[in-house]
Amino acid sequence: MGSLLQVRNLTIRYQVDGAEPHHAVNDVSFDLVSGEVVGLMGESGCGKSSTALALLGLFAKQRAEVAGSIVLCGQELLGMKEAELQKIRGSKISLVFQEPGIALSPMMRAGDQVAEVIHAHRQWSWKRCRAEAETILARVGLGSAARVFSAYPHQLSGGQQQRVVLAQALCCEPSLLVADEPTASLDARSQAGFLALLRGIRSEFGISILLISHSPELQASVADRLLVMKNGRIIEEGSFEGLYENPLHEYTRMMLRRPYGVKNESRVEADAVLQGNSFDE
Ligand code: ADP
Ligand code: MG
């Protein structure tokens, strides 16, 4: 399997008014080969989301200084023009992040939101884009896809919304999916469902995934290899089992052994109410 992504000496400094620039990511290098799922773990604020945003070229120059090299499918992404990046986002690399509610437009039906992404990348008729969107929704486990297709986001549960976002991310068959805490806003049941879905997707779509997640359970069952990040640096890497048995750092040991599934009760309740209101998952 060939190398898909090479990140070299990635350094990200945020420009903060009236303060010293803040080094969020420091000299980070890693590779990802085709079909591989790499997990990225580390405490809050260590630089995981900044790394994800840099991969998608989502930093405005005035906000952050990004240095190093990010080569995806043989193409250098750093310094690429916005118009070119827009062609690559969605078609070669996609992002799913924590809050599906933010990623989706509240005013547009779910299916049309997926069709719109396809329409932006393919020279297809709107009708064909909608038909393709329906197929993709079914592939991400939205079984009664025809109903989900015409639903507005508020009519869907958190888990279903996240699947619609995933459908958007996958609909143009990117080589790399970056998932930044994709299950963090979901209740326990939806988390388990999404975990199973990610496993299915990697085998069905043959896609590579950079999976950012705090959850040892998710990482253990999906990631082939883990990168452990602390204070903007990758401090160790290896298989989940290897790091679990023989971590170099206490930090890693604590992270991998942390109990999974600690949820904010009110959030779980809110989701339970929503589920009563929504379609079957
Ligand atoms: P993580 O995703 O691991 O929680 P982030 O990449 O979000 O970490 O943040 C890394 C560091 O960069 C943190 O110290 C955070 O406070 C800082 N940071 C993140 N976004 C910004 C921003 N827009 N402006 C200034 N500092 C930021
Ligand atoms: Mg983050």
Image (cartoon, helix red, strand yellow):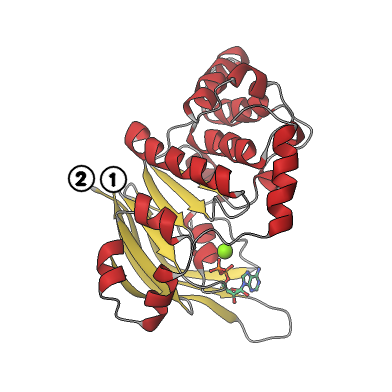
Evaluate whether residue 10 shows in this view: no
Q: Which residue is mark 2?
A: 1
Of callouts 2 and 1, which one flags the residue occurring earlier in the amino acid sequence?
2
In the image, 58: left or right of 76? right
Amino acid on which the number 1 mark rests in the picture? Ser
Between 205 and 244, the one lying in front of the other is: 244
- Which residue occupies 75% across, 32% down? 277
Question: SS class of the residue under badge 2?
Answer: loop
Displayed quadrant of residue 205? top left
Residue 37, image x, y percentages:
34, 50
In the image, 29: left or right of 156? left
Q: Which residue is mark 1?
A: 34
Dot 1 crowding, Cα within 10 Å, few <14, some 14–19, many 20+:
some
- Which residue occupies 30% across, 49% down? 36
Amino acid on which the number 2 mark rests in the picture? Met
Label 2, label 1: how far apart the Cα atoms are: 6 Å
Question: SS class of the residue under badge 1?
Answer: loop
Verify CB contact (< 8 Å) between mark 2 and mark 1: yes
Residue 127, image x, y percentages:
61, 13
Between 9 and 189, the one lying in front of the other is: 189
Tell me if residue 169 comes above or below residue 142 in the rendering: below
- Which residue occupies 50% across, 58% down? 52
Tell me if residue 38 comes above or below residue 21 in the rendering: above
Between 54 and 45, the one lying in front of the other is: 45
Tell me if residue 93 comes above or below residue 236 in the rendering: above
Q: Which mark is residue 210?
A: none
Looking at the rendering, the quadrant in which ligand 1 lies is bottom right
